């Protein structure tokens, strides 16, 4: 990807699914343009069999991730009003107790143990379900559906479609119940949030709750495993963080920049007019994908981009949570969960280390996310 970014930063490519070719944009500045410029539209994808890496499209037409301003601005304002930083911070003590309990169970199982199984696979789903007040008995099914939706295998297309329908039906029923009888949870807050006379309609609320559960636990699950793997295979940086735990918040931002969390691209955009990128013209109607991963390693933006440096002077913001109008609305929750889980693991286990050689760690090859399937550790 480094070669593509330097030699063909605006490249014509073909995805495994969907109709036709598309463009892939890999430089930081160009990714900023595509994700923040009104000349590129997510809403224009609706009704198209657009080029993608999953057999069935993940996004739904009513979802916020297929909206453009001003409709997008309206929905984001309502979400921001309901899903606040103080609300996330109020969840921090609960998250700390949950991490402690999960790690107690890992200790009781004996060393070595799989920290992916004991911590990463459990904590984010528990956290988002606590925030949304999802019944405990429903959570395994939601996890199964979320994983099925993210498969890149053509053989899994029917199960991905069924999973998406199952999630939609579940959250349509749940959000209707919360709107009728609100509680203290985030779904209730979203169902009653008003900005002037504006509220989320029934379809927007159902799809938003679905999106929060799927992306609110799925990505953070893999973030935890990836961050732990990276630290345990970079002893100098791990030692630095152990010696100076106050570096943790900034170190996590650098890890989010450095680690390639995806195995491909996400939801593209459509050019509404011809757009010239240094002589390469993307025509009106063309589909455009961006790579946040390569943007995070752009040597025009970051000094020594392929090095992990927890003390970068004046660090440039990364794009692990996207950019522009579709920047992740749950990034404050993800940061809190990462700070508590990673910080606690490093503090509690001063001798934490991989229990197998680095090359024996098995990686996911099926879904759009890149993460270790298991992470055996000793302490």
Image (spheres, rainbow, N blue to C red):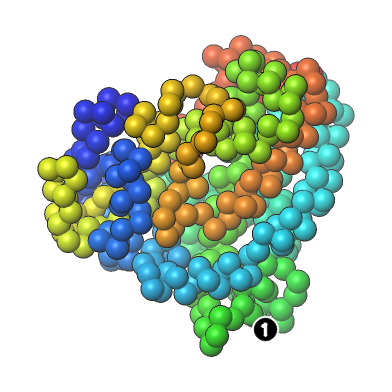
Identify the image quadrant of the N terminus.
Answer: top left
Residue 248 point in image, percent of width and height: 68, 34
The reply, left or right, for residue 219 in relation to residue 110 is: left
- Name the residue beneath numbered marker 1: 180
Up/down of 363 relative to 151, above or below: above
Total number of numbered labels? Answer: 1
Q: Is residue 344 visible?
A: yes
Between 199 and 169, the residue placed more toward the observer is: 199
The reply, left or right, for residue 299 in relation to residue 212 is: left
Q: Is residue 138 visible?
A: no
Up/down of 280 relative to 215, above or below: above
Which residue occupies 69% across, 45% down? 337
Which residue occupies 51% across, 54% down? 328
Residue 174 point in image, percent of width and height: 64, 72
Which residue occupies 74% across, 30% down? 245
Q: Secondary structure at mark 1?
A: helix
Up/down of 50 relative to 277, above or below: below
Which residue occupies 53% across, 66% down? 208
Residue 216 point in image, percent of width and height: 59, 53
């Amino acid at each position: 990807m480094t070669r593509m970014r330097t030699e063909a930063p605006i490249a014509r490519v073909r995805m495994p699914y969907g109709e036709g070719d598309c463009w892939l944009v890999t430089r930081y500045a160009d990714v900023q343009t595509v994700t923040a410029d009104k000349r590129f539209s997510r809403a224009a994808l609706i009704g198209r069999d657009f080029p993608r890496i999953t057999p069935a499209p993940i996004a739904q037409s009513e979802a916020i991730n297929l909206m453009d301003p001003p409709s997008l601005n309206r929905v984001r304002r309502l979400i921001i009003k309901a899903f606040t930083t103080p609300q996330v911070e109020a969840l921090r003590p609960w998250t700390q107790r949950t991490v402690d309990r999960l790690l107690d169970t890992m200790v009781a199982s004996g060393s070595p143990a799989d920290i992916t199984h004991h911590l990463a696979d459990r904590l984010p789903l528990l956290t988002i379900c606590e925030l949304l007040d999802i019944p405990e008995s429903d959570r395994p099914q939601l996890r199964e559906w979320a994983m099925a939706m993210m498969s890149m295998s053509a053989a899994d297309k029917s199960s991905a479609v069924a999973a998406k329908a199952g999630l939609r039906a579940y959250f349509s029923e749940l959000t209707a119940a919360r709107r009728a009888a609100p509680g203290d949870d985030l779904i209730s807050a979203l169902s009653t949030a008003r900005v002037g006379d504006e509220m989320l309609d029934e379809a927007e609320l159902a799809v938003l709750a679905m999106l929060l559960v799927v992306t609110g636990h799925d990505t953070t699950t893999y973030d935890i495993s990836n961050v732990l793997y990276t630290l345990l295979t970079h002893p100098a940086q791990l030692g630095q963080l152990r010696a100076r735990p106050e570096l943790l918040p900034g170190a996590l931002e650098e890890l989010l920049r450095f680690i390639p969390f995806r195995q491909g691209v996400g939801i593209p955009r459509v050019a509404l007019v011809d757009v010239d990128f240094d002589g390469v013209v993307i025509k009106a109607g063309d589909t455009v994908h961006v790579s946040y991963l390569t943007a995070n390693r752009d040597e025009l933006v970051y000094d020594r981009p392929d090095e992990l440096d927890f003390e970068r002077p004046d660090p440039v913001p990364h794009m692990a949570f996207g950019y522009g109008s579709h920047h992740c609305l749950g990034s404050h929750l993800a940061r809190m969960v990462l700070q508590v889980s990673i910080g606690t693991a490093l503090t509690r286990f001063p001798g934490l280390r991989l229990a197998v050689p680095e090359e024996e760690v098995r990686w996911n090859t099926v879904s759009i996310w890149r993460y270790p399937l298991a992470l055996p550790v000793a302490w």
